[in-house]
Amino acid sequence: MMNSCTLIARNFPRLLGKTERRCIYQAQQCFSSSSPSLSPSSSSSFVLSHPSTVDTPTNPSRGRIVCITSGKGGVGKTTSAASFAFGLAKKGHKTCVVDFDIGLRNLDIHLGMERRVIFDLVNVLLDECSLNQALIKDKRNENLVMLAASQTRDKDSLTVEGVEKVLAGLADAFDYVVLDSPAGIESGARHAMYFADDAIITTNPELSSCRDADKMVGFISSRSRRAELGGDDTNVMPVSQTLLITRYDAERAQAEESLSIADMEELLGLPVVGVIPESKDVLTCTNLGVPIITMEKESAAADAYKDMVDRYLGEEKELRFVTPEPVSFFTRIFG
């Protein structure tokens, strides 16, 4: 069986350093004309306040914008966005979670709000309703609200100016604005990551997922508003990027049947904010319309999301559920 080291050597012929990899991506993006620039028409005017105003930990002028994104689809972004936002709200932070997957919304299902959607993000962008009319309050936690995506419009409805206006309104009212981004680098994803203060890159422990995640790391480093402003303004910090590993199976990683945490850290060059173990509870909670972090019975996945929220907020916590469970004597004998 091909182990993880062989797979990495075949698919990544040379492990580039973090700085070297960023430079390559920036050069590629500078010479690429395949995707239009997201720069606002006037760089001197800020509807959403200047990024430096939110980087002061003692007195930020607005809420932080956190983008949950990935290069590959199906890695658990929406599941993670729902639990991450609920976890922040449970900690007492006023939180709004926004679905940016225009045409294919699912966040409302994960939060059990699918029957309560009247207005959506596109309605707000087109001035068909006010921002407050489109916000749906969570029944379990008063600190959490959701802004749904449209199911009937396409992603061409998104504009930089419109998205900035909506995010400015949300950032003024909430401590955290969590953006559930679609996969890849299409319009919805690009608009979601452009204004991000923090980006949580979600990936599974497989090469295709990590390779696509690596492209997202470079894209955010070169195409976000913070990246554009950083060249002329030394007060602007780059987007803070961290890695969230989902569907992690410690036994398979130990047997070198999948990538290990160390493999993914080395490939992507990002600190790990959380490791979510493979769990049947995820599907159960999705079908019930509740974030898995709300599970009251013992659940490794729920506890892992709680740890993730704590780490994001600055607490130091050791990674759990990253080593195989010990096998008892009787299990070894009788199977």
Image (cartoon, rainbow, N blue to C red):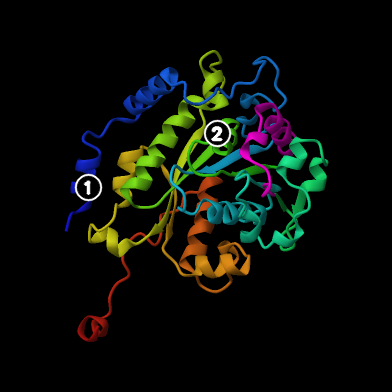
User: Please, what is the dominant secondary structure of the magenta stretch?
Assistant: helix
- Write down the residue under mark 2: 190
Quarter-wise, where is residue 211 in the image?
top left
Front one among 152 and 185: 152
Question: What SS does tag 1 mark?
Answer: helix
Quarter-wise, where is residue 3 in the image?
bottom left
- Write down the residue under mark 1: 7
Q: Quadrant of the N terminus?
A: bottom left
Which kind of residue does numbered mark 2 sit on?
Arg
Q: Is residue 274 above or below residue 13?
A: below
Front one among 50 and 252: 252
Image mark count: 2
Q: Is residue 193 above or below residue 318?
A: above
Which kind of residue does numbered mark 1 sit on?
Leu
Q: Could you say where residue 258 lies in the image, as x and y percent from the top left?
A: 28, 56
Check contact, mark 2 vs mark 1: CB within 8 A: no
Any part of residue 314 in sight: no
Indicate whether residue 233 is drawn in magenta. Answer: no
* Residue at 64% across, 60% down: 109
Query: How packed is label 1: few (under 14 Cα within 10 Å), some, or many (20 or more)?
Result: some
Q: Could you say where residue 330 lies in the image, as x and y percent from the top left?
A: 25, 85
Q: Quadrant of the C terminus?
A: bottom left
How far, Cα to Cα, is label 2 from label 1? 30 Å
Q: Is residue 256 above or below residue 298?
A: above
* Residue at 29% across, 64% down: 251
Query: What residue span does the magenta drawing correspond to?
Result: 148-172
